[in-house]
Image (tube, grey):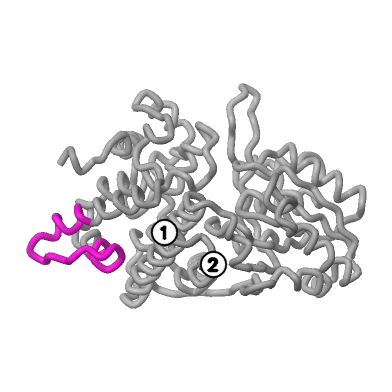
Amino acid sequence: MDSVRYLNRTAFVLGRGAESDCGVMVRQEGARSVLVLYGRKYAPQSGLLERLSRSLDRAGIAHYELGGVVSNPRVDLVREGIALCGEHRIDFILAVGGGSVIDSAKAIAAGMFTEGDVWDLYRGTKSLYRALPVGVILTFPGSGSECSDLSYITNDDEDGQRVKCALRSPSLIPRFCIMNPELTYSLSAKATANGAVAMLAHLMSCYFTAQDHVPIVARMIESQIAGIIDALRRCQGDLHDYDARFALMWAEMMVFAGPLTAGIARDHATALLENAISEYRDKPHGNTYSLLVPAYLCFITEHDVMKMARFASYALGVPLRFDEVKRTAKEGISRWYQLMEDFSLPCYLSDIHLSPADIPGLIPHLPLAKGHIGSYVELDRPACEAIYTLAVFNPLRLR
């Protein structure tokens, strides 16, 4: 790691009842009229929307609501939001939910200053220079969208094929993120695990990288992974464990917004392999890391078997055998499988109703224009096919 430039542009408020401050925080941004964007069930049914409405009323902020955001959010709802913002002269977007809602809010914010269709920004035929400010009430940790400059939106192309495109701009970074662990109590054990595993996958993409780490950074990543797994186990035992939920939200902030991974050239291979599945079969983003991570790790183990063994030991708790590092590495992958089974997450492609016959259909959804993805190990088309094949069943049984 040669140099680091770190700037955190998102203000975080973490704790019980934190959402009661949203009106004040929106007013501090100079807003007068807000669009409150949310998903389908939790925000209206839990009473959260009503509490946010009261907070905005106390602050003298006019507010309008738009719900219905789904996983792999669609551009159609974004267009509806843009029209609503134009009609009511809205000058701030408040996203209430997880990654899909936040990405949609960013897309609406970007579309307000774009002539023509907002999808042109995502296709790359137009450039973004300005966007409305966005704030977040986080109810589903795991995506990191609450502090990133990225937004992913899905549309159908001329052939009816589902296409997911990204838009990146500093103007899309949310101004604030309010995190009350109690707002995640309604998440099922499986949903909680999915969010946590997405965090783990992000950390692993910063660990298995072609860039040399400062040793203390690698140790911090290992400790963070172990801490997330511990908090997740506690949540599995008690979905209303406030301290465990707090720990996962704190980890969310540290993983995606803190200095922990600043300056690291992240390897995006697993994210791209996962994104191809979500685009191909309309699976919620992040829900297939549980099966892709062990297949990827098995494929790359020979690249640096000592690093994989060290990861297995310090992050996953496998005793490190210096005389049998390959065995330690394999035991780490086995430990991952066991964890995913404990959390009732998919471990194989068959668990999400995909078979080897689907693998050729996944490849066109990978950005292989340069011939490969990834940097820790460059993965060409045959390598990507091999990783998907390893995800058909436990690859350790083949070796």
395 relative to 140 in the view: left or right: left
Q: Along the line of sight, which residue is nearer the eye, 353 or 262?
A: 353
Q: What residue lies at 65% left-to-right and 34% top-to-bottom?
A: 155
When the figure is inspected, residue 99 is found, relative to residue 272, above or below; the finding is: below
Disc on res. 183: none
Mark-to-mark CA distance, 2 and 1: 13 Å
Which residue is at the far bottom?
216
The x and y percentages for residue 294 are 31, 48
Assess disc 1: are there few (<14), some (14-19) or many (≥20) residues with their C-alpha within 10 Å of its C-alpha.
many
> Which residue is labeled 1 in the image?
200
Query: In the image, what residue type sits under mark 2?
Result: Met
Query: In the image, what residue type sits under mark 1?
Result: Leu
Q: Give the magenta-colored segment's residue range.
A: 310-331
When the figure is inspected, residue 351 is found, relative to residue 183, above or below; the finding is: above
> Which residue is labeled 2 in the image?
249
Please name which of the two marks, 2 or 1, marks the residue nearer to the observer.
Answer: 2
Q: Quadrant of the C terminus?
A: top left
The x and y percentages for residue 24 are 80, 74
Q: Along the line of sight, which residue is nearer the eye, 279 or 131?
A: 279
